[in-house]
Image (spheres, rainbow, N blue to C red):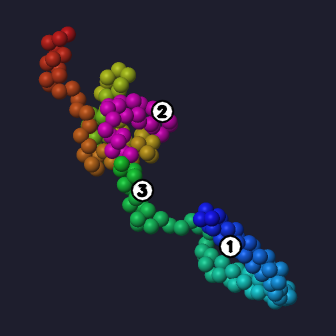
Amino acid sequence: MNRITPILFLLIGSLCFYAGYTVGVKKAPTAPRNHVAETSIVKENLETTKKFEETTKPESSAPPQPTAIDLAAEKVVRDHEFSIRAAQKEITFTDKKGRELVATVIQVTEDNLKVRRSIDGLEVDLPVAMLSETDQVFAAYLAENAIAPAASQQMSDKIWDELFK
């Protein structure tokens, strides 16, 4: 009997719930719908929305100007990318014609980069003006931040090279 009591209460409660729900749905008062009033409300809402959209439209179709925060964030990202690129031993430079040069940076000035070509080891002065826009900005970053590029062959290296020819 003790086991049957909770099941019996659960069954009776479920039946009462179902009966109340069914009676409530069947006997719920339904108000006649006034389609004319609903249509006018929808039209008013649509007009209000159009007025709001017209007032919030920008005056011109030009894209919004970047803010100081946007510009600062772009500079941080660019500087991070350039710092990673500057840490590489060999860097690929591209000129305005699309030609590529793989070299190690030896010395940086505002107008020139002294580089050692990877192909033959020849040290060349590379004018910054002849580089692509991206590489010109990168060269300016190197000059601005005084990145210590790979030095040309040190005297001690030359001595070791002479000793172990």
- Report the residue at 17% width, 20% height from top: 158
Tag shown at residue 74: 3
Of tags 1 and 3, the one toward the viewer is 1
Q: Residue furthest top?
A: 165
Report helix, strand or loop for mark 3.
helix
Type of residue at label 3? Glu
Label 3–label 2 contact, CB within 8 A: no
Mark 1 or 3, nearer chain start: 1
- Report the residue at 41% width, 65% height from top: 69
Looking at the picture, how far across and down is residue 141, in whole percent? 33, 48
Q: Which residue is mark 2?
A: 99
| Quarter that holds the N terminus | bottom right
Residues packed near mark 3 inside 10 Å, few (<14), some (14 to 19) or many (20 plus): few
Q: Which residue is mark 1?
A: 13
In the picture shown, does residue 68 fall above or below 156?
below
Q: Nearer the viewer, residue 65 or 129?
A: 65
Magenta segment: 81-104
Mark 1 or 2, nearer chain start: 1
Report helix, strand or loop for mark 2.
loop
- Report the residue at 21% width, 26% height from top: 153
- Quadrant of res 12: bottom right
- Quadrant of res 55: bottom right
Looking at the picture, how far across and down is residue 135, in whole percent? 41, 42
Looking at the picture, how far across and down is residue 139, in whole percent? 35, 44
Q: Nearer the viewer, residue 155 or 114?
A: 155
Residues packed near mark 1 inside 10 Å, few (<14), some (14 to 19) or many (20 plus): few
Residue 21 in view = no
Answer with left or right where residue 50 lies relative to residue 156. Answer: right
Between the residue at mark 1 and the residue at mark 3, the CA separation in whole angstroms equals: 65 Å
Between the residue at mark 3 and the residue at mark 2, the CA separation in whole angstroms equals: 27 Å
